[in-house]
Image (cartoon, coloured by chain):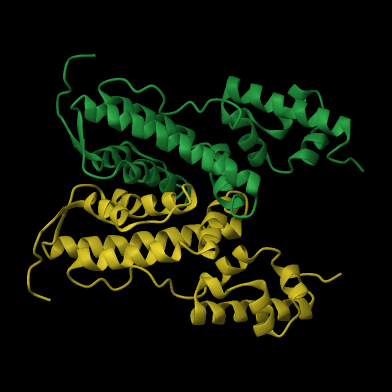
Chain colours: A yellow, B green
Amino acid sequence: MTSDKDPRFLRSREAILNAARQLLLEGGPGAVTHAQVAERAGVGRATVYRHWPQAAPLLVEAMSTVPLPFLDEPTSPIRDWLQRELASIAQELELDNVRAVCTTLANTSLWDEGMDTRRAQFAGIIADRLVIALDEAQARGELTLTLASRDAVSLAIGPLYYRSTIERAPIDHTLIEAAITALGAWSAEPPLSS
Amino acid sequence: MTSDKDPRFLRSREAILNAARQLLLEGGPGAVTHAQVAERAGVGRATVYRHWPQAAPLLVEAMSTVPLPFLDEPTSPIRDWLQRELASIAQELELDNVRAVCTTLANTSLWDEGMDTRRAQFAGIIADRLVIALDEAQARGELTLTLASRDAVSLAIGPLYYRSTIERAPIDHTLIEAAITALGAWSAEPPLSS
């Protein structure tokens, strides 16, 4: 039997995580499969399964070590930027792999402390970034928020997450528009200053 | 070894499901624990664990056999009714048991066909009921929906679900208000006709 303290066990675990991280950065979450991870890490597929019987927790681990490619560095007009960012989140949520990550985070975190830390991290990053963007939109006079920014986060992301993981249906353009509109009063024309 | 065809196995499975259903109806989702189900069914706790290693899938099974106590039979003013219904969903979502059911539905349905059927059922009931209520509100002149009713469903439920299962934080009154407001233009005073 291998154990958590066995150096070979730890080495293969590290190699697998590195491979998953590389694949994630090169090909997105869809590329992180047992087969591809095994090949990239130079280990047998059975070894990957021994460490991570399911792909989703491995992907969660890998994602927690690379920067989240969403909602970062808002540009004006913020409404257009937000539209693009939510459309890009929507596109990712079409992938079974990403649905698996989100729902595994939500589910497993109920009894697994490590996973709960990841969940909180993930939720925190999304919230912090969105709040920065909305603050910026308000400072630029592009938006008058009609709700607390904390509620704005749930209102912007929640509908996409529900549509994807409970309704299991495509997130169309109209849903994204509705979520953005719900945040407050957007000025029709943003000021011209950059 | 027991098997799926063994009559005793099937009998204990049935007894466990009946017990879970009774407990659910009497005490809500919080009452459906391995210990209480075992006691009510008159079987050992180990037997319950053999059939359902985790409580959430058992609760999903039991819930699928009893009427969902939400969003049914809208009353005028629909806005007040919707507020009460969403507040009651929010209260349920405070229970770990209910969070476990929702996230197990979303997660396990990705690879388990039976669970996927439950997920679709659940999403369908929520959507159908909410659409009926919103149609009624429009017919009564209480609401002018500013989005497709399909999007209204995601916008009403999604923020609560995200707040509860990803942000793992309480669903406060302001979030419910924001979600209701996002659906369209509500008339300040509903017509007096019942």
Q: Residue at x 8, y 64 (%)?
A: A189
- Image quadrant where residue A93 sits: bottom left
> Which of the 4 image quadrants contains residue B23?
top right
Left or right of B26: which side holds A98? left
Q: Position of residue A109 (x, y in %)?
A: 57, 53
**Residue B99 seen anywhere in this rendered image of the structure:** no
x and y percent of residue A127 in the render? 36, 59
At x 69% / y 79%, what residue is drawn?
A: A38
B130 left or right of B7 in image: left
Q: Residue B157's spot in the image, x, y percent? A: 39, 41
Q: Is residue A59 above or below residue B22?
A: below
User: Can you say whether A94 is above or below A164 in the image?
Assistant: below
A62 or B193: nearer the viewer? B193
In this view of the protein, which residue sits in the foreground, B18 or B123? B123
Q: Closer to the camera, B98 or B73?
A: B73
Q: Quadrant of residue A2?
A: bottom right
When the figure is inspected, residue B39 is found, relative to residue A2, above or below; the finding is above
Work out which quarter of the rendered image holds the C terminus of chain B and state it.
Answer: top left
